[in-house]
Amino acid sequence: MVQLRTSASKNLLEISNDEQRVQQIRLSSYPAAISGIGYWLEGTEGILLLNRLSKNFFENLSPNLYFFANSSKPRVGIDEFEKFPHILLPFFLTGACLTAKAGGKIYLSVLIPLFALAFIGNVNDLGPFSVFPFIAAPTARGLEKLDRKYLVLFLIFYILTLTQIYFYENAN
């Protein structure tokens, strides 16, 4: 509920001037014989809504958003940051696989915030924080499987990673 109140929602059917220009270019590239099909695929509000919902939904599923500050796909107007240090990604994947093997009913409950975020977007200073517990729990489960003899080595790398993140964020 807090995610819904603090996120800046955007009209899913509103098209900016640049998007209109791109849409007109794409529509004009269809042959005249099938221009009706092109308009149906590119110009209807239903298709636009479906495209925006799927973009929002799958953007929130991307591990890149949580572990790498969305580095390859920066979003305009949003100050990206790593929600979880990238060193935790293997432990998240391990925990996610273990959870899936054990039944994985927790994954059904993550669909509620993901669908809500698909409709409102994740334009928020903290990002999609309603999904964080569904990333933290499998990560913790993956860390439980870490052998004790590697724990000190992991902690050293973890502290080095946090130091690196700190200096990258404060380099300006």
Image (tube, helix red, strand yellow):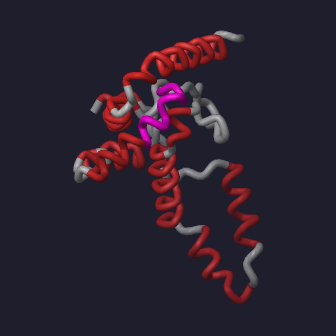
**Residue 88 place in picture, x, y as percent:** 47, 30
User: Can see residue 133?
Assistant: no
Q: Quadrant of the C terminus?
A: top right
Residue positioned most to the front: 149
Residue positioned most to the bottom: 33
**Residue 5 place in picture, x, y as percent:** 34, 30
Q: Is residue 137 above or below residue 52?
A: above
Q: Image point 57% across, 75% down: which residue?
A: 40
126 sits to left or right of 74? left
Nearer to us in this view, 112 or 150: 150
The main secondary structure of the magenta stretch is helix
Q: Quadrant of the N terminus?
A: top left
Q: Image point 62% across, 37% down: which residue?
A: 75
Q: Image point 46% across, 43% down: which residue?
A: 60
Residue 26: quarter of image: bottom right
Q: Is residue 25 above or below residue 168?
A: below
**Residue 168 place in picture, x, y as percent:** 66, 16
Q: Image point 73% across, 57% down: which residue?
A: 21
Numbered marks: total: 0
Whether residue 21 appears in magenta in the rendering, the answer is no
Q: Is residue 128 above or below residue 158?
A: below
**Residue 140 place in picture, x, y as percent:** 34, 30
Whether residue 88 appears in magenta in the rendering, the answer is yes
97 sits to left or right of 44? left
User: Can see residue 153?
Assistant: yes
Nearer to us in this view, 44 or 152: 152
Q: Please report the bounds of the magenta region as a residue range.
A: 83-93
50 sits to left or right of 26? left
